[in-house]
């Protein structure tokens, strides 16, 4: 009992249990098979909790765990339909027309403006709420690589190996994630209407 | 001359790998003239620092 509690000092057992329930109802919807759903949740949760100490907030952990679960479910579905394991990088296409014009320059209104003082922002619960919402709004694969890079602090080679991504696809995903995340933080925190 | 899209791509990659000398020079030329990309670069640094500080601070309870 005590040993189990030490495994995830940051998160209470009831937090994990409630997370597991949310994952299970999500997996059931996608897989339509109770057994497969439970297996996927179990595997995703076990894999995710190995890195739980990288996430000090429950909401970030949730985003992380769900990104892993989505991938597990995709693997299961892919196995059922006998599709090739490696698929094209769906989220790698250039889709940032709202940020850049045809010549690759900032669109009017999208140009980054100064954030101002970020000291002591790390202590602001409200800031991290906005941050989590912005992170969740990213396409799943982008959020996942961003968290692997910035929260778990894996290097590019480790991320590429574990996700079977090419380095160039990884860099595209991280670029898109950072563009969108900083735009979202500007809109909803740094330049929000008072 | 880099476009802003290319410049931000290099600034992002600079967080994940060491840029080559020509890449750094191209970026310097671009950011000297482009305040948007200059801010983008600063903000990537701020983001990394914030996430680091938040992780160091530990679990949420006990925070202001």
Image (spheres, coloured by chain):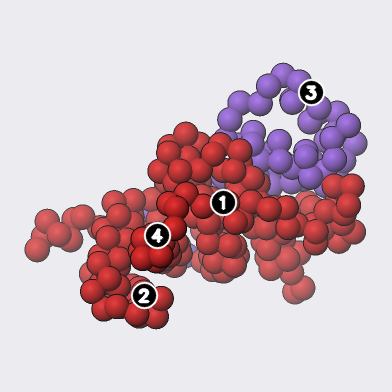
Report the quarter where the N terminus of chain B lies.
top right
At mark 3, the secondary structure is: helix
Asked if residue A129 can be seen in this view, the reply is: yes
Task: Name the residue located 15 percent from the left edge and 59 percent from the top edge.
Answer: A4
Query: In the rendered image, which residue does mark 2 sit on?
Result: A31
Per the rendering, the mark at residue A111 is none
Q: Earlier in the sequence, mark 4 or mark 2?
A: 2
| Marks 4 and 2 share the same chain | yes
- Within-10-Å neighbours for mark 1: few <14, some 14–19, many 20+: few
Residue A164 position in % (x across, y down) = 45, 43
Residue A88 sits above or below residue A79 on the image: above
- Dot in front, 1 or 3: 1
Per the rendering, the mark at residue A88 is 1
- Dot in front, 1 or 4: 4
- Dot in front, 3 or 4: 4
Q: Earlier in the sequence, mark 1 or mark 4?
A: 4
Task: Name the residue located 32 percent from the left edge and 61 percent from the top edge.
Answer: A44
Task: Name the residue located 74 percent from the left edge and 26 percent from the top edge.
Answer: B23
In the rendered structure, the answer to whether residue B29 lies left or right of residue B60 reads right
The chain ID associated with circle 3 is B
Palette colour of chain B: purple
Residue A20 position in % (x across, y down) = 30, 72
| Marks 1 and 3 share the same chain | no
Query: In the rendered image, which residue does mark 4 sit on?
Result: A82
How far separated are the C-alphas under marks 1 and 4?
16 Å
Query: In the rendered image, which residue does mark 3 sit on?
Result: B25
The chain ID associated with circle 4 is A
Work out whether residue B21 or residue A173 is closer to the camera in this orientation and state it.
A173
- Dot in front, 4 or 2: 4
């Amino acid at each position: 009992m005590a040993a189990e509690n030490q495994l995830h000092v940051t998160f209470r057992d009831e937090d994990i249990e409630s997370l597991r329930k949310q994952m299970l109802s999500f997996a059931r919807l996608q897989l339509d098979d109770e057994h497969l759903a439970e297996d996927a949740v179990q595997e995703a949760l076990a894999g995710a909790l190995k890195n739980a100490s990288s996430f000090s907030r429950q909401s970030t952990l949730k985003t992380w765990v769900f990104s892993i679960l989505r991938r597990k479910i995709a693997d299961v579905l892919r196995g059922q339909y006998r599709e090739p394991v490696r698929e094209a990088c769906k989220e790698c296409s250039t889709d940032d027309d709202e940020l850049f014009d045809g010549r690759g320059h900032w669109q009017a209104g999208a140009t980054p403006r100064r954030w101002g003082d970020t000291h002591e922002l790390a202590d602001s619960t409200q800031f991290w709420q906005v941050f989590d919402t912005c992170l969740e709004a990213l396409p799943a694969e982008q959020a996942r690589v961003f968290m692997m890079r910035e929260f778990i602090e894996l290097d590019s080679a480790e991320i590429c190996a574990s996700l079977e991504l090419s380095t160039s696809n990884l860099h595209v995903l991280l670029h898109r994630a950072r563009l969108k995340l900083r735009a979202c933080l500007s809109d909803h925190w740094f330049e929000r209407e008072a | 001359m880099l476009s802003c899209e290319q410049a931000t791509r290099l600034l992002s990659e600079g967080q994940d790998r060491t840029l080559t000398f020509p890449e750094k020079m191209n970026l310097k030329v671009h950011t000297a003239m482009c305040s948007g990309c200059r801010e983008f670069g600063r903000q990537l640094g701020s983001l990394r620092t914030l996430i680091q500080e938040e992780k160091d601070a530990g679990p949420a309870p006990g925070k202001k």
